[in-house]
């Protein structure tokens, strides 16, 4: 019998500082309900889903900064989302700013099963941008507000498959998908906040949407896995962010895609055995992959640009 799952991507429009927590939670509950109405077993929310993408501006006041973080888990900020997901029996992936008991700060992503149990936590490894403010239309200060993730790229069993998590810039790095594929991951769920305009490299502005799907389609195909990528989209605190949320098959095909820059639910019935078929032949790591010939790819080679 084929292994099929219905997965949903809950793209969100802007979450502005002036919007109340209750209002944002209400939008997320509506997306959970729409996902459930389509028979989804899983709904994936964006990176930093319930708060504005605050690395886009300078925050000097520590208390003002910490207001965006949740202690260990995101449940406290959006309890209704977790309650509704449990009532409807749907698993969720949700991105959030994590503050640990030891006051360490991470850009995190977590998978909760349909009963609300935490199945997997991931902390963003690839932090783009800068540690100090730049002369630019908007900032990209993740290195100032988060530590590099310290959990690696873990994979967990869930619903008869293996799931991995990633966050935003991670999707641009080939190692992200391969690290999880080598552990048997069949689905990678990630959220992103991606501005249309990149102040430090404006020449790529016309390619932002193309690079978004290129990265996820390449990762999906080269590792025979499903990729669910979910945007926080639209003009948020003056920064226009792309939508383009997508569900990508191991073939590299985009099987569902958002068309707006607002709250939008997309879903697809995914065939997990497509992973099996592609890994049995095309990307059979054991039979075809030759790491002994790849050289020292773990270390930077010459020509690496320093900071
Ligand atoms: N945002 C962007 C992303 O990787 C970026 C940063 C944009 C990097 C464009 C390079 C090019 O999608 C986050 N939050 O990582």
Image: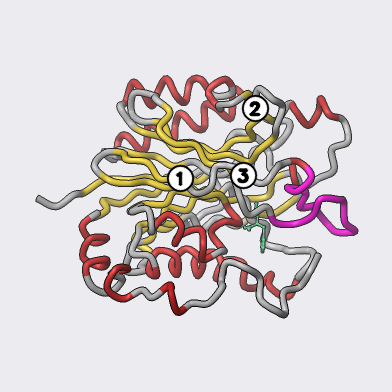
Q: Earlier in the sequence, mark 3 or mark 1?
A: 3
Give how far across and how far down residue 78 sits, in percent. Answer: 54, 24
Would you say 206 lies left or right of 144 here?
left
Which of these two is toward me, 287 or 6? 287
- Secondary element under disc 2, as helix, strand or loop, is loop
Which residue: 58% across, 47% down? 232
Q: Which residue is mark 1?
A: 154
Magenta-tinted stretch = 128-144
Which of these two is toward me, 188 or 68? 188
Distance, label 3 to label 2, CA atoms, is: 12 Å
Look at the numbered discs 2 and 1 and tell me whether their residues touch, using CB distance below 8 Å: no
Would you say 114 lies left or right of 58 here?
left
Q: Tell me, yes or no, whether the highlighted magenta stretch contains residue 139.
A: yes
- Count of picture labels: 3
Q: Earlier in the sequence, mark 3 or mark 2?
A: 2
Which residue: 52% across, 32% down? 27
Distance, label 3 to label 1, CA atoms, is: 11 Å
Q: Which residue is mark 2?
A: 100
The disc at residue 149 is 3
Quadrant location, ligand no. 1:
bottom right
Give how far across and how far down residue 107 sits, in percent. Answer: 63, 41
Look at the numbered discs 3 and 2 and tell me whether their residues touch, using CB distance below 8 Å: no
Q: Tell me, yes or no, whether the highlighted magenta stretch contains residue 202.
A: no
Which residue: 35% across, 68% down? 253
């Amino acid at each position: 019998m084929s292994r099929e799952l219905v997965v949903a991507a809950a793209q969100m429009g802007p979450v502005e500082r002036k919007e109340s927590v209750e209002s944002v939670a209400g939008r997320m509950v509506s997306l959970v309900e729409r996902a459930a109405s389509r028979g989804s077993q899983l709904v994936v929310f964006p990176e930093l889903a319930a708060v504005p993408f605050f690395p886009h501006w300078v925050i000097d006041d520590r208390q003002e900064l910490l207001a965006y973080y949740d202690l260990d888990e995101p449940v406290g900020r959006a309890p209704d989302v977790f309650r509704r997901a449990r009532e409807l029996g749907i698993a969720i992936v949700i991105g959030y700013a994590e503050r640990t008991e030891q006051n360490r700060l991470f850009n995190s992503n977590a998978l909760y099963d349909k009963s609300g149990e935490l199945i997997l936590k991931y902390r963003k490894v690839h932090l783009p941008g800068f540690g100090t403010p730049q002369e630019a239309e908007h900032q990209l200060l993740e290195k100032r507000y988060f530590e590099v993730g310290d959990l690696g790229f873990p994979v967990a069993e869930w619903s008869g498959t293996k799931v991995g998590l990633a966050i935003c810039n991670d999707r641009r790095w080939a190692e992200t998908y391969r690290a999880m594929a080598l552990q048997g991951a069949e689905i990678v769920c990630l959220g992103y906040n991606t501005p249309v305009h990149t102040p430090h490299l404006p020449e790529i502005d016309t390619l932002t949407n193309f690079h978004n799907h290129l990265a996820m389609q390449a990762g999906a195909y080269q590792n025979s896995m499903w990729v669910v990528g979910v945007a926080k989209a639209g003009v948020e605190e003056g920064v226009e962010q792309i939508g383009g949320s997508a569900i990508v098959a191991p073939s590299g095909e985009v099987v569902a895609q958002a068309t707006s820059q607002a709250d939008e639910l997309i879903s697809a019935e995914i065939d997990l055995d497509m992973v099996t078929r592609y890994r049995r032949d095309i990307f059979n790591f054991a039979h075809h992959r030759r790491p002994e010939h790849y050289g020292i790819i773990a270390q930077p080679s010459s020509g690496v640009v320093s900071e």
